[in-house]
Image: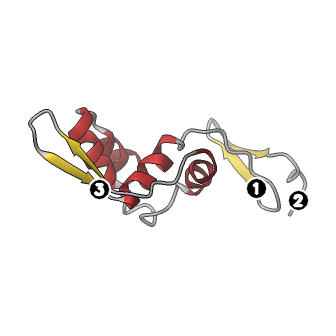
Amino acid sequence: MLGPLTKYDRYTGAQAAAWERKTHPSSAAAEWHGYCHAWAASSVLELEPRVRRLLTLPSREEVQLTIGDQKALQAASHARDVANLYGPGATATTSNRPNTRTCFPISCGAS
């Protein structure tokens, strides 16, 4: 995710890659971890990229977005979509009450 976010930052002047590094340190989880729900949403809601894109930066430098880069950026754009989890094990711990479990639809009482 950092490669596509770095390209995005170069184009927009944002700090998305730095935020990703700080918020999701690579030592804490596998590199791909954390974007499954976002990838699922983007694969249904966005048109699939089929060609590479060439971006021209304000400095006139060109940055190529591969199909994979575009898919990663689409997934990143859906990372904060609401994700309803269903089935066994679809529970989460409420961050401000660590000993409280939150049940998601259909999973309440599932083991």
Tell me where residue 19 sits by quadrant.
Answer: top left
Q: Which residue is mark 2?
A: 110
Disc 3 versus disc 1: nearer the observer: 3
Q: Which amino acid type is marked by label 1?
A: Ala
Image coordinates of residue 47 in percent, x first then y, are: 54, 48
Would residue 60 be found to the left or right of residue 33 on screen?
left
Disc on the earlier residue, 3 or 2: 3
Q: Is disc 3 placed on a helix, strand or loop?
A: helix
Which residue is drawn at the image coordinates 62% and 54% (left, top)? 40
User: Which dot marks residue 51?
Assistant: none
Badge 2 element: loop
Q: What quarter of the picture does the N terminus occupy? A: bottom left
Name the N-terminal-most of marks 3 and 1.
3
Q: Position of residue 79 (x, y in %)?
A: 53, 44
* Residue sitting nearer the eye, 42 or 34: 42
Instruction: Specify few, some or many for label 1: CA neighbours under 10 Å numbering under 14, 14-19, or 20 or more.
Output: some
Q: Nearer the viewer, mark 3 or mark 2?
A: 3
Which is more N-terminal, label 1 or label 2? 1
Q: Which residue is mark 3?
A: 3
CA neighbours of label 3 inside 10 A, class few (<14), some (14 to 19), many (20+)? few
Badge 2 amino acid: Ala
Q: In the displayed structure, does residue 20 sit left or right of residue 78?
A: left
Q: Quadrant of residue 66?
A: bottom left
Which residue was labeled with disc 1? 90
Three-letter code for the amino acid on which mark 3 is drawn: Gly
> Could you say which is closer to the camera, residue 53 or residue 89?
53
* 78 relative position to 30: left or right: right
Q: Is 7 above or below relative to 60?
A: below
